[in-house]
Image (spheres, rainbow, N blue to C red):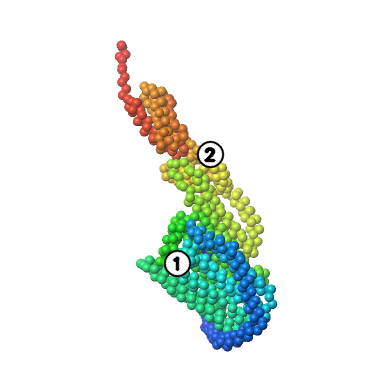
Amino acid sequence: MKTSTRFILAPIIFATTATLANAQVPSTDIAGITLTLLDQLSGRTDAIAASFAAAPLEWETAREAFSKAMLSGGGVRSFTYVLLLLMIGLGLEWYYWTYSYASLRVLLNVEPASPRQTLLFGFRRFWLAGFGLLFFAVAAVGSTSAFVWPPGVHDIVVTVTLAIVMFRLSVIVANIVLSPGAPQLRLVPLPDRTALILMVGLTLLAAAGSIAWFIPSVIARIADAPHLAQALRIGLGTLIAAALLAACLLLLRGREKILAERRRGGLPKFPRALASATLVVIIYGFWLFGNSAAAVILATIVVVIALQISLRAMVFYFWRDRAIAEEITAEAPNGEEYDEPADPELAPSIILPAVRLAVVLIGLAVCALAVDMPFAGMATSESPLARFCFRLLGVAALALLANVAWITVRTTIDYRLATIDKTDEHEQPGPGARLLTLLPILRTTAASIITIMLVLSGLWTLGLEITPLLAGAGVVGLAFGFGAQSLVQDVITGIFYLAEDTFRVGEYIESGSSTKGTVEKLTLRTVALRHHNGPLHFVPYGTLGTVRNTSRDWVIEKFNLPLPVEVDSEKVRKLIKRVGEDMMADEELGPLIQQPLKGKLYRVEPGIKIFRCNFRTAPGNQFTVRAAAYKRIEAAMSAAGISYAGNVPVTRTLEPSGA
């Protein structure tokens, strides 16, 4: 599990651990608690058995009552009204599709260029199909108020309509995700046969779930058959649990075998199929024996954890190109596990923490609804514990938001830094040097600001007054400023250096304190200079003084040529000029030179003429150009019969003093 996932799940794990740690149950009460639980389970089992025993009789009674009602005038009238409702709802939906089906047909026949475009097509398909279903639901349910129904029939019609809408909505979502008839629009990497089997299974589960959600309550209210309603609910719930259990044992077992073969030689892992089946049985047991809230909370926690583990691969899957996505679809049945691309885009790295946060918030909302948690009552409750728990939820929400903000900022900066080309120490820093200089400092500053805001907001949420803290922090900051003037001077001086763009990462500078080197790293107080001999100097900004930057714009390189005093100065000047013109015409050296090589007589010493040569180039290129100039000048002088001073034999004639 990744670090961000652990951070998001940490509040839930911490709260659970703290609750268990504070629950001090005496050892003498364990036996009594166990007996109480067994008695409750026995009573629940007897109630379930009684419901199944009384269900046939209630079924016969309800069936006879329904038959009599349907043969009466009110029953015929109700049946006619239901037909009219279906005609109104389906007619309005048909009218919608006469104008919208062309757009859906285009989506079904277009080949997406990437998985990301497939996801976009999926949203558009849901938009079109969802609006059609919305028209049907509004027309069918809204039209019921226009008719006069017999007692109880209106309730039945509305409930059955809502069950149909829920079933159709589930089928729409499953069809968009699996797309058994359009493999190019499939949002998950599955083969056609597996997608078709899953589609059929999910359709049956949606039908069973819709009936179990709506119909038993109607039977209990209208037909006065609570045992029949309970038996129907338990039967459908058992069917759904059995289907999920079979899916865990059959579908995941094949994947476990393949993964076990790939991990051959490593440490064995707990089988996922067995773990999933065990969780299904536990959740079903909680629900069956009357603790529906615990079942919903446990199921929500399992789903949230499973999504947190899988979200990374799910999000990054949509940022792969089409070829890789097709390979994934072809290899998915073999149990291949995929990570994100080696060079991911910025968007999925930002979307991932937001989706993780949304999943956790939805899970918390579902758990709150399951236990019917009164948030408004907790905020105004007289119980200190209730108010404290409510404030802790606020702190947890702030922590999650701060985590998302930090991941967004950090990912954006790291991605931008990774896209900047690093320059060689002998080359001029590129246009990204200023970003290399400022972005790391901006990242550190953002982390400090987010942390301070989180701490202050958390204290305020817990009910602590932060105004005195801010005032005290101001006083402490003032005293700290007087006591650490050099530190404050370093920070403020560094801010001005960076604001004025005095130097950047990768540039060679010389400070007023005789320290020089290539800028490697900047912090809030110091700059790290790498000397050309290797040592790394950390220099506070306050001691830099005058900065000489030798890596900006251009540099003029000068060097001397010692020649014999007898050489023709004009001939040497023209020779150096021709060498400079040849270097400018060279394909490799020409782009490096801004002003051509030139030379002139600089000074005359006893027996030697010093010629000064110079050229202009971009910072960092002068070493390459100077070496090439030496070689070419030496070759040209050798061809012209000119040698350096000191290599020509000198003949002197000494006359007698008495001559």
For mark 2, does the 10 Å Cα neighbourhood hold few (<14), some (14 to 19), or many (20 or more) residues?
few
* Occupied quadrant, residue 60: bottom right
Identify the amino acid type marked 1: Asp
Q: Mark 2 or mark 1: which is in front? A: 1
- Judge whether residue 396 can be spotted in this image: no
Q: Position of residue 44 (x, y in %)?
A: 55, 84
Q: Position of residue 442 (x, y in %)?
A: 54, 51
Q: CA distance from mark 2 to mark 1?
A: 71 Å
User: At 56% across and 77% down in the image, what residue appears?
Assistant: 212
* Occupied quadrant, residue 368: bottom right
- Judge whether residue 356 can be spotted in this image: yes
For mark 1, does the 10 Å Cα neighbourhood hold few (<14), some (14 to 19), or many (20 or more) residues?
some
Q: Residue at label 2? A: 546
Identify the amino acid type marked 2: Thr
Q: Residue at label 1? A: 192
CB under 8 Å between callouts 2 and 1?
Answer: no
User: At 52% across and 56% down in the image, what residue appears?
Assistant: 347
Q: Earlier in the sequence, mark 2 or mark 1?
A: 1
- Camera-side residue of 394 and 519: 394
SS at badge 2: loop
